[in-house]
Amino acid sequence: MKLAERMGRLGTETAFEVLARARALEERGVNVIHLEIGEPDFDTPAHIVEAGVAALRSGETHYSPSAGISELRESIAHFAGRKRGLTFSPEQVVVTPGGKPIMFFTILALAEKGDEVIYPDPGFPIYESMIRFVGATPVPLPLREQNGFRLDVDELASKITPRTRLLILNSPQNPTGSVLQHSELAGIAELAVRHDLVVLSDEIYSEILYEGTHISIATFPGMAERTIILDGFSKTYAMTGWRLGYGIMPVELAPHITRLVTNSVSCTATAVQRAGIAALEGPQDDVRRMVEEFRRRRQVIVDGLNRIPRLRCATPAGAFYAFPYVGDVGMDCRAFADYLLTEAGVATLAGTSFGAHGEGYLRLSYANSIPNLQTALERIEWAIKRLR
């Protein structure tokens, strides 16, 4: 079967490929510790589950408006506005099955052949994949360890050309756990306004911070009217399998993104949206407990990695990923990740799964129990000793 040429430009998310390989090993009896997949290992809070079940039992099993039910859009506008110190209207909100559609639809709606899109590298791999798929030119912006894995504003300025259409930000960041500082966001905002850039701000980890409070680029002068905020429920409320995300955007863009929803998935499941309302309007104690547990795990994984010879690991400021440097082990990061999986039973992701500038690093998700993290560290140290 002959595929369309654009299919050759479509990438993937390596986490799911490694997960499949790890599951295959487990089926053969191999004990694998999963540090590859980026999802909380907690159950969805009970009151959220009950809201979804109640909606199903009450017959909410039919189509909903493509942009989302009005009650959820109102709840999102209120919740997100209160968290960011902004005022949003429900008309600015588009609800989608997961956060990825907001990436895809934003890039599809705003970028085309001849346009350039700047995105972080290392960064979530779907950014580059979608940019290439729509025919635009991806322009990677390196995130370097010496700068705390945060972008350099002067380097960003040097990447902007008359063809730059869109800038993608992600803070707290996947895969490095870095968080942009106020001064950096101010500099980025000034560049966006000066060059008339639209910003897709991926804030899916905004509630998983270990110090301070989340700052959105949309709060800076001139940015509310040129920012699309991507957020959702998967990470904050341990709802990855529910598939519930949203975008908050300028009101004139929302109908166009909604048409893309209509043309692709029609709508998001109504019962899932009811669960989303319960998540936003119900108690937040489970979220706080989860973040505190991630804080404890962060200490275990970072301290443990830094005790292993030939490794070093910066302390992430947000999300639930460690991004250790493994460039001194004697093999490239992808080969090392394969070695850890097959020889030590530890599933990780190569830094190059997130872009060329991830070479020399691994991403380890510490969304796993402390005993499992400690065992993984022991196995990693054992595996490195074997390489001598």
Image (cartoon, rainbow, N blue to C red):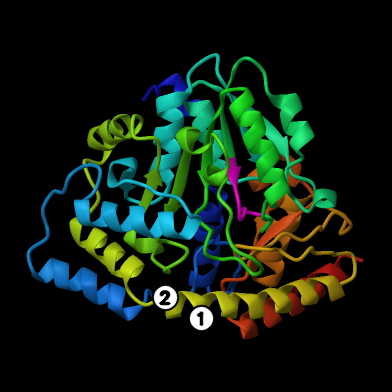
Taking the spot 72% from the left edge, 26% from the top edge, the residue there is 159
Q: Is residue 82 left or right of residue 89?
A: right
Q: Is residue 9 left or right of residue 371?
A: left
Q: Which residues are magenta?
A: 169-175
In this orientation, which residue lies closer to the viewer: 276 or 192? 192
Give the alpha-carbon distance from disc 1 to disc 2, as whole Å.
9 Å
Instruction: Report the mark closest to the observer, 1 or 2.
Output: 2
Taking the spot 58% from the left edge, 54% from the top edge, the residue there is 215
For label 1, count other residues whose C-alpha is less than 10 Å away and answer few (under 14), some (14-19) or many (20+). few
The secondary structure type at the circle numbered 1 is helix
Residue 284's disc is 2
Quadrant location of the N terminus?
top left
The secondary structure type at the circle numbered 2 is loop
Q: Amino acid at mark 2?
A: Gln
Quadrant location of the C terminus?
bottom right
In the image, farthest residue toward the right:
388
Assign the magenta stretch its main secondary structure. Answer: loop
Residue 208 covered by magenta stretch: no
The picture places residue 88, in percent across and down from the top left corner, at: 37, 47
In this orientation, which residue lies closer to the viewer: 336 or 75? 75
Residue 121 visible to an observer of this rendering: no
Taking the spot 25% from the left edge, 41% from the top edge, the residue there is 265
Residue 289's disc is 1
